[in-house]
Image (spheres, helix red, strand yellow):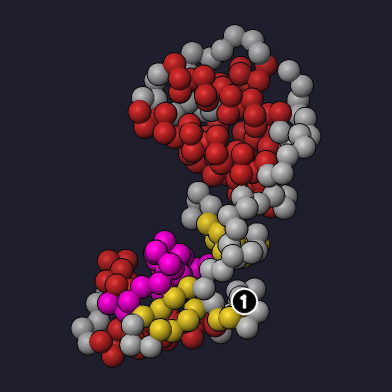
Amino acid sequence: MSGRIAQKMNNPLEKLENRFNSLVKLKEEDPYSSRFFIELQKYFIFINDTYPFGDIARSIFSSSSTPSTVRDIKEFYESVISGGNRSKITPVIGLSLFHGLLVENAKKTGLTTGCGKVFCRDNLGNYYYRDKKLKFNKKSIYYHIFDYLYSCPDNKATYSELNTHLAKSGFGDKNSTDKKKERIRNAIKVYEKSDAKFPKTIGEIPVFEVEYGVGLKLNNIDI
């Protein structure tokens, strides 16, 4: 089998994600089934044969900073792509972490999952604005607000819902409605004064839009 083939496809990262999502479903059903084993081999073959995934995978396996649960996948991966004797050990632990590292590093090369929105989130919980990674302080209130709104239907939530989420995330509770609103609005002000790489507006549309008397909306528009 050839080392790498620069396949002509519209979105290789999206195809990788689709393959992995199908693999996850089979893993949830039975990680030791023959179907999972076969699809796992196809997943690794696709990685090896699709540039730049093969190079990225080899870099991940060889890095001393890679977690051991990911490096343990190397033997199976190499046995699959060599076409020789298959390893009898099916890697289950560390597979999601390996995929997340693969996607994260692939995006650094300019590939995109093509989520169709200005903001996208990868499997490791990292956010991207127009395919550029946002370096959030994940302990900050505004990150938790952003993360919560991103996951909400229509990307919006009431002040009460946001306050409940913040309380569960370790930021304490606010009893009065005014204090709930004040905390959330102050967090947005901190975001807007933060790193210049964080978008404050999308064209003329604010990233965070206050729906007065209701709550807050994240304007994650289509691109």
Q: Is 27 in front, or is 63?
A: 27
**In the rendered image, the vertical position of residue 100 relative to residue 141, given as above or below:** above
* Residue appearing at x 38%, y 88% in the figure: 212
Q: Indicate the position of residue 145 as horizontal and vertical percent values.
A: 41, 72
Q: Which residues are magenta?
A: 136-160
Amino acid at the residue labelled 1: Ile
* Residue appearing at x 72%, y 53% in the figure: 110
Q: Badge 1: how crowded within 10 Å, few (<14), some, or many (20+)? A: few
**In the rendered image, the vertical position of residue 75 relative to residue 165, given as above or below:** above
Tell me: 112 left or right of 175.
Answer: right
Residue that badge 1 annotates: 202
Per the image, is 158 magenta?
yes
Q: Indicate the position of residue 51 as horizontal and vertical percent values.
A: 74, 36
Q: Which secondary structure type mostly characterizes the magenta part of the structure?
A: helix
Per the image, is 162 magenta?
no
Q: Quadrant of residue 193?
A: bottom right
* Residue appearing at x 33%, y 82% in the figure: 214
Report helix, strand or loop for mark 1: strand
Q: Is residue 108 visible?
A: yes
